[in-house]
Image (cartoon, rainbow, N blue to C red):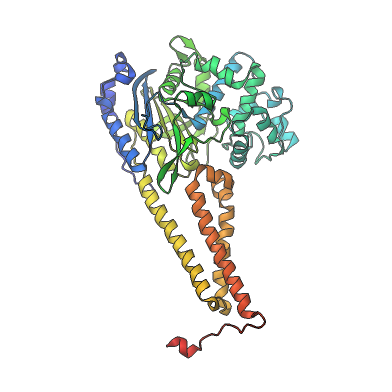
Amino acid sequence: MPSTSHHRAGKGLRTWLGRRGAAAGFPAREAPGPGFTAVDAYIRRQMTDARIPGLAVGIVCDGRPVHLRGYGRADQSGRAFTPQTPLFIGSCSKSFTALAVMQLAEAGKVDLDAPVRRYIPWFRVADPEASALITVRHLLNQTSGLTERAGRGATLAAGMHPLEPAVRALATTRLARPPGAAFEYSNPNYTTLGLVVEMAAGEPFEAYLKTRIFEPLSMHHTYTAVEDARRNGLASGHRYWFGIPVASGTAPHGSTVPTGGIISTAEDMSRYLAMYQGGGRYHGQVVLSAAGIAEMIRPGPLAKRGAFAGAGYGMGWFTGPWGGVDASYHPGDEPGAHAGMALVPHGNWGVVVLFNVGLHGGALPGLLAIEQSVTGMVAGGTVRDTGIGAFYAAFDATVTAALAAEGWSLARLARRPSAAAQGRHRTLPLLWELGIPAAIAVAPAAVFKVNWKGLFLYGPDMSCALAGIGGLSALTGLTRVINTINAEHPVRGRPPARQMPDTARRR
C-alpha cells in the first residue's frame, strides 16, 4: 500500500491567483511560480520516488491556463518533456467521443435515446433481443451490459484498426446484464460510439474530431495517427520492470481511437478543459451548448467497485471525490503512458497531468496520486505520495523469495529423489506445487480481467514473475511425480534407491 501523508493545500495558490484567475496577464508558460512552488516540488518528489522519466502538468483557472510545466525527459536521447510534448492520453479520449456525439445530438443528427441500430443497422451482440434494446445513451453511460473483461479483450484485438471490424466482432459477445441495468466500464461502448459518429456525420471519426473539436480549440498538437505524432515529437513510452521504467519506443498502444487512441499535449489539453469551464465556448468558438456540457458531466450510474467505486459516470467523465474535492475527472492509461484530467466546480479549476510510464493497466493505482494530489493542492483537497518505491521494494523482495523457495524445492528433489516417495507426506506438497501454476494460469482473467497477452503488454514484470513462479512450481511437481513413480516402479535391471534405516537417519 502506498504511504500517505494527507494535508490541506492550495490556500496560497488561491490567494495569489484569486478565485477568477488573477494571473491571466502572464502567458501561461511564463507565469511566475510563487503559487505553484509547492506543486512543482511535490511533482519532482514523486517523479524521483516512482522513477517517472517525464511529466507535464497544466493547471487552468476560470478558463485560462495559469501554469504549464514540463519535467524530466521525453525519450532516451534526453530530449526535455515539455507542455508541448505529445503523448497518448488513453481513456481521456472517451470524453472527446462523447463530445462528438453530443454535438451531433444538438445538430439533430443523433437521438441519444434511439437504438444504436438506427445508426448502425447491422449492430448486434450475442443476444438478438438485447441488440435491439441498446441505445446511444447506454453506450455513453457505460450501461449497455458489455463487461470490462470483454472490453479489454476486444480492445487488444482491435488495436488501432478501423472501427467497423471492431464493432462487428461484438456479434459473439455476451452481455452480463440487460441494457440499462447497471454501470460497467467497457471499452467497446466507446468504440461503437465512434462508429455512430462516422455513420451520423458521414465522415471518418478522425476527420470529424479534427474539424469540429481540435481546430476550434486550437489543439494544433493533438493527433489521431501515431505517424503524425511521431513526426512532431511523440514521447517514448516506458513500462516498469521490477521498479525500473524501461523504454519501449513509441508508447505501445492497445485501444481504438474513440476509446483511448488520441495523442495530445498538456498545453492542448489545458485548452480542452478551458472549453468546459467556459460552458462549451473557447475564445469565441462555440463547441457545445452550456446545457450539453452540463449533461456530459452530470453524475450518471454509480461505479460499485474498483478504484472509482462511488463515482457516477456521465458521458466520458467520472464525477465524485477526487483529491479530496468534488470533481469531474477521467484517467487514461496505456501500456507506456498515462494521462489524467479533472474539473473542479468550486473555484473553477482544471488540472491535466501526462507522464510517459504506464500504470500496469491499473495494477499500480498509487500513481493516480499525482493527478489527484495536484487537484487537491490547487482546490484545497488532500495530498498523498504514490508509494511506488515502497511497493516495488516489497514486490521485488516477494518475487525473489518465491523464486528462491521454488528453486530450492526443485534442487532438493533433484538431489534426493527418494524424498518424493514418503507416502502421505508427498500428497500435500504435490497439491501445492501443481495448484500454484493452475491458479496462476487463470489469475489474469480472474483478477486483472485480461488475457496473458494483455497482462504482458501492460505489466511485463508482473507477468514474467507469475510465469516464472508458476513454471518452477510446475516443474517441481512434475519432478516429484517422476521420482515417486521411479521409487515405486523401478526400471528393470536397476535396483531401487536405497533408503537409510531409521536408526541411521536419526544419527
Q: Quadrant location of residue 374?
A: top left
Q: Residue furthest top?
A: 284
Residue 423 in the image: state x and y as whole percent: 58, 79
Tell whether 189 sits left or right of 328.
right
| Nearer to me, 467 or 77 | 77
Tell whether 475 sits left or right of 388.
right
Residue 151 in the image: state x and y as whole percent: 60, 38
Q: Is residue 428 above or below residue 246?
A: below
Q: Quadrant location of residue 11?
A: top left
Tell whether 387 sits left or right of 331.
left
Q: Is residue 411 visible?
A: yes
For image coordinates 58% across by 64% down, the residue present is 434
Q: Quadrant location of residue 507?
A: bottom left
For image coordinates 50% across by 46% down, the residue present is 460
Residue 266 in the image: state x and y as whole percent: 41, 25
Residue 311 in the image: state x and y as whole percent: 48, 35
Q: Is residue 492 above or below residue 16?
A: below
